[in-house]
Amino acid sequence: QNFSKETSEMSSFELDKLHQIEQELVKHLNVLYGDDHSIPQLFMDANKFLTDFRRSPQAWNVCLHLISSKAQPQNNAQMLTFATQTVYDNVLANWQTIDATQRYYCSNSLQQFIVQFSEQYLWQYVQTKGTSHAQHFRFILNKCMSTIAFLALNGNQANDMMQSVFSQCLSVPLPQQLSTFWVHLETLNAFALEFEQQHVSPNILTQTRDFLSTRHRDTLLQVVLRAIQTALQCQPTLYKLLSIAFASLKHWINIVDITLERMQSVGLLDEVLRAILCLYQTAEHSNAKQFMVESITKITNKGMLNRDDRQEYEAILHKMCVTLHSLQPALQTAIESGHLDTVRSLCHLICSFCEAEAQYIARGEHEVCLRLIDMILQFTSHASPMITTETFGFWSRLQDIGMNDRHPSLKRDVFVQLLRALLAHSTDPQEFDQHSRFRSNSSEIFISIYFTLQLQYFVEIEEHLYLHPTTTTTSSTTSETNDESLLRLVRIESCIFALSVIAQEVYDARDEADVQDMLDHHIKPICSFLFACEQHTKTINTHSLHLLHEICHFFRGYAFYICRHPQLLQQCLVYSIELPCKPHTAVMLYECSRTFHKLMFHALPIWMQQLGVFEQIVQSVRQHIGDGQRFYQQLSADEIELLEDISVVDTAQCDETVFDAVTRQQSGTAMFYESVCCIIDAYDDTKRQTALMQTLVEPFLQKCGAILQSTTANDTSHGAQQFHELIGDLRIFAAFLRGLKTTDTSTHPLLTQTPQILTICKACITQMPTSTSMMTAMDDAKLNMEMLYDAVCGVMECVLQIFGSTTSTMAQELVSMCVQILKRTHSESAAHVLQKMVSTFTGCAQQIPLAEHFVKVIYDALTYFHRDEHCDVAECHKTVHYILECAVIQTNCYREVRTVWTMLVPECLALALKMLTSIQDRDGLKNILKILKQIFDVQNAECLNRIFAELLQESLLPNLIRVLFDGIALHFERMIASKAYDVYFNLMQWKPDYIEQETIASLNQLPLTMFQNDENKQLFMTAFSAQKSNERKFLLVLSTFYSVCHNFNTPDSFGAMIA
């Protein structure tokens, strides 16, 4: 039906059909937005109907008729919201199929509607009366005006419409005809939003922008001026009119290049400053404040218009500084009243202005500039980390200004105050994410302060650190209140963080004499202070937990200095070994292990001179750390929760992926052993090295053997505890191997134990899934088996890394283990190990039987992931990627072996198609497209020709081309699409005629209006064919195709690419 005619031109049949759809729409809207959802099926049917309706080409016209009809649903405001949104979306998607008459009808109908609607509901909205129409007023009005603006821009009518809007805005009597003025102001907003969203051709936007900039910039500013004046003159103040005025100013700033000088020239700046003072007289009206702050920020960031008239510009800045400083009482009131939103708004306003004009502020030629910096210091000292962080941009910008261009008080003194403010700042330690984020954001500020203050930085921190003497007597402990104790912990933690964060900068300058003196005077006393705190002897809480973390970071940061002093080194090592062994500090095991590792690494030259002392340290690790199981078992429920919170925050910083509390503790234990093995790895005495490693390894081999024997006997006495012990021991085996990675493989100290370790790994795979005693004792058997398999794969990967191709005798056994794991859990670790084995052994002439075995294994894996109905490739896309990489390695190595290509490549394509149509993960899609690019590389053309018939079976190749083409046109985001271009180019180098034929078929089926036209299709295909041999230009053709399909460009752009 032609639903796009005006109803006066419709036949009776068409009108009946329109009314029928309209009544059906009203019925479903009443169900969806009504209060009665007692029948879920009706609600679901209504939702489906409305979703399908919005996609239909006639939706805009039906909704347009519904907006002005009397047959409106019970919930009229929600209906109008739905209808106006649908009109906008539908016109945006189908505007090319709507002719000029229909566009005029649409625009005219909407204009008539919004005039009546605003007259009826504007004052309710302004006075915030609680009717539903008032609540939805702005949204409904915005969508109508956005549709009108879009149609006007595309119809080359924007200039005329804007001129009419300007004329009426400046002539309409106010506040008598406020509704008319308001509608026109919303029209300006709607045009500005269309410029930002770029739904229209760039050429049209450029022409319209040039027209407005040259002829109507001042007129636009006068309209905003009139809106602000009207809002301020009304009683009470029309804050919502202020909001829309500042919103309009914000949107137009970059479009027509609005600057402070241009605002000053029409008198707008004075009114804006008056509005700022008015807005902060109350804690309300956050929307108006937000738009005002964003407007001021955008304008000040544009800087000075005329570089030759600096004096006039600085007069404007002085005027603004005076106004901003006059907000000090409002700031004090907001702080005392706890109005956080107002404080934050003031902070954003003042800091963004001072950051943009930092050079002017830094000179401090007027006292008011220095008073603004005092206000910024006040913001920095605020308890809220969000507000404190807001000031960091200004402080960083101030540091970029040369000392000679700053006021004397802004050279050093202000940074002493800043350091004191930051050291006194405390985030809520219960909020782990917030605490971590604040520390991360503040680190650059601390570093910049250090470069300014140098020695004084350490002096200030020590003074702050020693505010109260540290004693361990009972009387001092009992006399200190709980609040005082917490504040003390926060103070110490802030100081230690401030020292830790500059450690790299200090390390870089460690050879300078003044830096060495500074370290000698401060690091030792601070370490002694931390040891004397004995924080590890007290009950753990979030405050002390953060402090202990910072202490570990501090020891790691200054390990280069600590390791020069043997006595201090031993104290720190003992601290890191014994800290997690004290009551209530087992949660620190992982952090302590990282600290121990760093100290041992820096102390390597010392240990080579003092092997006896080192072996005492090894004995201490064996004694205190052991197998690490008790560090998990002794944790309370609260401590486990703390540990899991830390795991989430710290995962990105860890050398290994830390899954949960158990894995974190196991990884920490393993790192202790890896650290000592790194030193043992450097032994010159092979016999001593082997003997020491045997002492370390044998207890774990015996324990694992006993655990596995008990599972065979179905011993139910230990269950889950033994299971976790086994996983922990496997991680320790991997740590032994990682630590000894540089030793000659022929004399490796674990050469004889490695087969035993692999036998244990094999037994874990074969025995554990059948061990009912352990499986029944655990809540989530599948998750626990994944942890076990991950540990097994960690061992296998280390064996391959150290022994490489010398493990060929056990390679088939390793492959078999990987395959078993893959079939049970789709383990990413197992696939990675398999890929590592394929890389290690493929291509060795003596390993042809093994290579054939790999091909069979890879084929089975590809087939499984492709054909198994229960395998969700979206959940295991990383595993699939490793398997596909194995296949690519094999095909690249054996290009002359047709059976390898015949078996693997078709299955690769089938699995890649499944992945491309099943997953949404960006990295997953990029990886699959990378694999396809490698398969269709030009070097493989001859191999691909030999299996062309196989690629046509089950329509593999045609389907691949269609998925790539549709992905570029409809589904892929730009970053993913760019990877698809590369695959397409390689395909064209292989079979250009065939690929072009399939592309035409896909283009003909493309459901996009811009390619319904044969001329546009021909333009694209001509450019596509013309540039098929030039990679850069071919990729440009596909990039332009993507832009056209997503309404960022027009089909005529292909014309320039045909030549």
Image (spheres, helix red, strand yellow):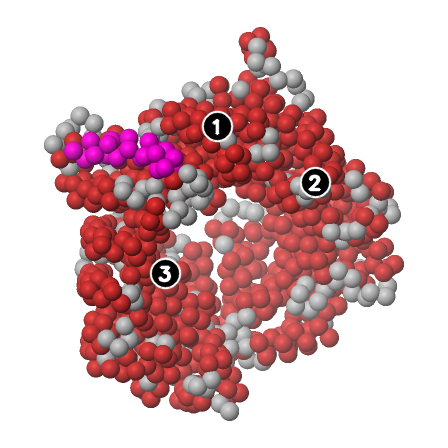
- What kind of element bears circle 1? helix
Q: Main secondary structure of the magenta part?
A: helix
Q: Which of 833 and 177 is in front in this view?
A: 833
Q: Mark 1 points at which residue?
A: 613
Q: Where is residue 385 in the image (x, y as percent from the top left)?
A: 59, 38
Front disc: 3 or 1:
1
Is the residue 319 above or below the residue 372 in the image? Answer: below
| Residue 746, percent from left and from top | 33, 49
Which badge, 1 or 2, comes first in the chain's sequence? 2
Q: Mark 2 points at which residue?
A: 450
Residue to which mark 3 is pinned = 924
Q: Which class describes the residues within 10 Å of circle 2: few (<14), some (14-19), or many (20+)? A: many
Mark pair 3, 1: CA separation = 50 Å
Are the residues at dot 2 and dot 3 in contact (C-beta closer than 8 Å)?
no
View extreme (left): residue:
713
In this rendering, the answer to whether 562 lies above or below 813 is: above
Q: What element carries label 3?
A: helix
> Is-magenta flag for residue 24?
no
335 sits to left or right of 789: right
**Precedes in sequence: disc 3 or disc 1:** 1
Magenta range: 687-709
Q: Answer whether residue 430 is visible to the viewer in this image.
A: no
Q: Is residue 600 visible?
A: yes
Q: Is mark 2 on a helix, strand or loop?
A: helix
In the drawing, what numbered circle is on residue 725?
Answer: none
Which image quadrant for residue 428? top right
Residue 938 % position (x, y): 37, 80
